[in-house]
Image (tube, rainbow, N blue to C red):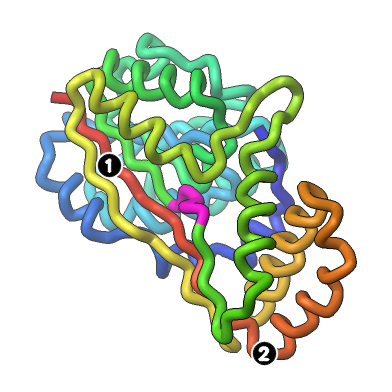
Amino acid sequence: MSTFAPEWLSLREKADAEARAVDLVDRLLKIDLNRDPLVVRDLGCGTGSLGRWLAGRLGGPQHWVLHDRDPRLLSIAAATVSGVTIETHEGDLTGLTGADFAGTSLVTASALLDLLTADEVDALAGACVDAGCPALFTLSVAGRVEFEPAESLDGDFAAAFNAHQRRVVDGRRLLGPDAVAAISEAFERRGAEVTASPSPWRLGPEQAALAGEWLRGWVEAAVEQEPELAADAPAYLRRKLDNGRRVVVHHTDLLAVPR
């Protein structure tokens, strides 16, 4: 699991909040979540942005169990997710089982699934179903970006970036933009009801700092994956930055409810 800088997570928090699919939360609120209090387990919690966005929408007494491998991020999350009681767990979350989720009302994660492997998302779906708890996963990359204005090189850089998202890291083949389909199939195979909704970032000049940082990272990853793009990359990036940094970055949110 990758470690992310708090500065990057802070920079993207507003765009994340605006993108998340509120309709899935509305569906979630119609489910009996076994509140007393509501126990929410947030996987890869980062600085707690999902907790800050979701806790008020869920309402009522809540206990949040925050998981992350980075103690810096955990400490920020524990101090800034307010109105709920907090418990933190530092370490790898890919080995969690249904027994670990016992007593959990809801499993959540944000921008996590694309960092997992096929076996890991299958195990995560199995753990949720075994524990009988719903799961809300937000902001998984969808593998599509739309620039304004568009140009012919967009497809080359996008294909390279998507391949980079599917790269092998420490012997693990990441799912990248295939993650939502993989975990949907894993839940449905176990009889869960799955609902997906789009959750795109819509970035323009008012979010120039985020758009610029995202663009630089996107191009860098594409060139790392396909070095032949390096010759075009500086001028390509400059054109994108000079044209107002307008881009739609597509994500998908997913709600899975065991039957």
Q: Is residue 120 above or below residue 197?
A: above
Neighbours of disc 2 within 10 Å: few (<14), some (14-19), many (20+): some
Q: Residue at x 75, y 63 (%)?
A: 219
Q: Residue at x 41, y 37 (%)?
A: 64
Residue 19 percent coordinates (x, y): 41, 65
Q: Where on the picture, by quarter, is residue 36?
A: top left
Which one is in front, 50 or 195?
195
Residue 119 percent coordinates (x, y): 50, 18
Label 1–label 2 contact, CB within 8 A: no
Mark 1 residue element: strand
Q: Amino acid at mark 2?
A: Asn
Question: Is 248 displayed left or right of 57 in the figure?
Answer: right
Q: Amino acid at mark 1?
A: Leu
Numbered circle sitting on residue 36: none
The residue segment tinted magenta is 139-143
The CA span between labels 1 and 2 is 36 Å
Numbered circle sitting on residue 255: 1
Q: Nearer the viewer, mark 1 or mark 2?
A: 2
Question: Is 153 displayed left or right of 105 in the figure?
Answer: right
Q: Residue at x 47, y 46 (%)?
A: 110
Magenta stretch: helix, strand or loop mostly? strand
Q: Is residue 20 magenta?
A: no
Which one is in front, 151 or 128?
151
* Viewer can see residue 78: no
Numbered circle sitting on residue 243: 2
